[in-house]
Image (cartoon, grey):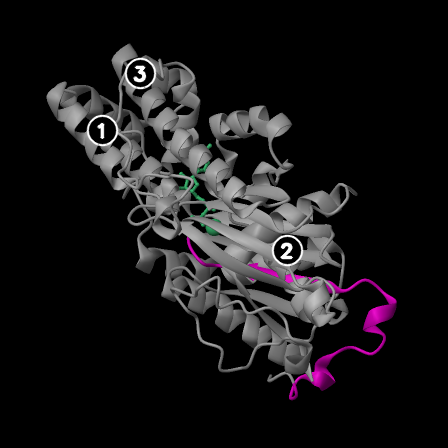
């Protein structure tokens, strides 16, 4: 399915009706499929979470993730196509996440997408997962019929696997292809991703996996000023470039561990671990009953430190790059304090955009949406396209018309 080899796969009259792309996402622990029209209308979006499988281990177990994807991929894709109310033959392309992510997990989605594309004689579009998160923001605006965000945009992509700041540019003038994008990463985490820090701290404190949603809810019941965490050393100054915008979250995770040791919290943590064994999904009330005030203060202070760091870096980067919009996306973009802080900034900053919660966390609608401009430019993937666990966002080259011919 080289761009040349796949020309025939383009359905006749594709331009006369909406372009329907089936997106498939299996980069981590969600098996997802969605049908999106013209990168703007979500006909269906189905997500099967593996939280129940990984929960007891306190994090994603790669081998189990691959097995769960294998189990789920066929019914989830079928459900997405059925819910969209279309026949497989009415799809114009199959889009799939190529990377970054867990290689075994990616392989399941990519292999299934290739098989489907081959069987249906449809083009295959390979999508970078991070590009998908960025396009979730554009999709949200289109779904709501709002004007397109202005570029260049600064994207804070913040999830369980990634924390980065990227400048996204729209390349229309440069190569005359509608909706072509290029990306430049200006800051990334040097160790843990922000979501990973949430997950590790939650595991350490006995709150289970995934950690973000529960710590977010508990943080509202604690004092964010109670515990002071030292900021990571990568100072952000107006004059500094490059690494100054990098993030580091492992220090704060270690600080929480020290606090736990110094404050003799082993017993209460054991009680919470017991609660999770009895109750697979404890309610907020149950968690609160098992969380002394000092622990809630620790959680609130942790959340405050992480959010402060994310917001400060983003504000600095937006100023430095003089961008016209700010996108906040990825699983951690669901965080209530992060949203509150960015919302408060709105008056004094370029417009700030978030996708709705279901588009912030991993989903396949964002993959189908990111594939749309590639489909228009006929940038199709080859049968030999491999999964790429560390696929770089910059590697997602701007679309070049010459490539499609
Ligand atoms: O984007 P995503 O679904 O998957 C990855 O690409 O990693 O993000 C999942 C991450 C997990 O680490 C989870 O703990 C975190 O997002 N997360 C949150 C919240 N909801 C999910 N972190 C903080 N606050 C939340 N409300
Ligand atoms: Zn993600």
The residue at the far front in this view is 239
Indicate the secondary structure of the residue bearing disc 1: helix
Q: Position of residue 47 (x, y in %)?
A: 55, 49
Residue at the (43%, 69%) spot, across then down: 107
Residue at the (61%, 57%) spot, across then down: 169
Judged by depth in the image, the label closer to the viewer, 3 or 2, is 3
Residue 25 included in the magenta stretch of the image: yes
Q: Is residue 360 above or below residue 293?
A: below
Kindly tell me whether residue 162 is visible in this rendering: no
Identify the residue position indicated by label 3 in the image: 297
Q: Position of residue 118 (x, y in %)?
A: 61, 80
Q: Position of residue 345 (x, y in %)?
A: 57, 27
- Sequence-wise, which precedes: disc 3 or disc 2? 2
Identify the residue position indicated by label 1 in the image: 256
Q: Are marks 3 and 2 in contact (CB under 8 Å)?
A: no
Quadrant for the C terminus, please.
bottom right
Indicate the secondary structure of the residue bearing disc 2: strand
- Sequence-wise, which precedes: disc 3 or disc 1? 1
Disc 3 to disc 1, how far (Cα)? 12 Å
- Sequence-wise, which precedes: disc 1 or disc 2? 2
Residue at the (26%, 24%) spot, across then down: 272
Label 1, residues with CA under 10 Å away: few <14, some 14-19, many ≥20: many
Residue at the (39%, 20%) spot, across then down: 219
The dot on residue 194 is: none
Q: Which residues are magenta?
A: 4-29
The dot on residue 34 is: 2
């Amino acid at each position: 399915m080289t761009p040349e080899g796949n020309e025939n796969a383009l359905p006749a009259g594709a331009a006369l009706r909406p372009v329907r792309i089936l997106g498939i996402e299996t980069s981590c622990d969600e098996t997802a499929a969605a049908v999106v029209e013209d990168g703007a209308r979500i006909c269906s979006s189905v997500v099967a979470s593996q939280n129940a499988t990984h929960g007891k281990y306190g994090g994603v177990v790669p081998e189990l993730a691959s097995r769960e994807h294998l189990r789920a991929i066929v019914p989830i894709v079928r459900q997405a196509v059925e819910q969209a109310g279309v026949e497989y033959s009415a799809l114009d392309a199959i889009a799939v996440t190529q990377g970054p992510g867990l290689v075994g997990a990616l392989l399941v989605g990519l292999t299934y997408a290739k098989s489907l594309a081959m069987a249906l004689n449809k083009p295959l579009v390979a999508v970078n997962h991070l590009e998908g998160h960025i396009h979730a923001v554009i999709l949200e605006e289109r779904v709501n019929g709002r004007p397109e965000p202005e570029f260049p945009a600064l994207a804070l992509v913040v999830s369980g696997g990634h924390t980065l700041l990227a400048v996204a540019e729209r390349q229309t003038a440069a190569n005359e292809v509608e909706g072509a994008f290029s990306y430049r990463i200006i800051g990334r985490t040097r160790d843990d991703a922000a979501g990973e820090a949430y997950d590790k701290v939650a595991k350490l404190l006995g709150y289970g996996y995934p950690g973000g949603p529960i710590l977010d809810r508990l943080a509202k019941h604690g004092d964010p000023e109670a515990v002071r965490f030292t900021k990571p050393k990568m100072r952000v100054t107006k004059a500094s470039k490059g690494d100054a915008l990098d993030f580091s979250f492992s220090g704060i995770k270690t600080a929480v561990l020290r606090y736990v040791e110094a404050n003799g919290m082993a017993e209460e943590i054991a009680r919470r671990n017991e609660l999770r064994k009895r109750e697979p999904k404890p309610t907020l009330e149950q968690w609160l009953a098992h969380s002394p005030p000092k622990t809630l203060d620790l959680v609130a202070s942790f959340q405050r430190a992480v959010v402060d760091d994310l917001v400060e870096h983003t504000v600095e980067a937006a100023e430095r790059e003089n961008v016209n919009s700010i996108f906040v996306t990825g699983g951690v973009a669901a965080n209530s304090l992060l949203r509150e802080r960015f919302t408060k900034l709105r008056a004094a900053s370029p417009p700030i955009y978030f996708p709705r919660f279901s588009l912030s966390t991993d989903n396949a609608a964002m993959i189908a949406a990111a594939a749309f401009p590639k489909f228009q430019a006929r940038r199709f993937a080859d049968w030999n396209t491999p999964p790429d666990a560390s696929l770089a966002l910059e590697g997602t080259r701007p679309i070049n018309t010459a490539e499609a011919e």
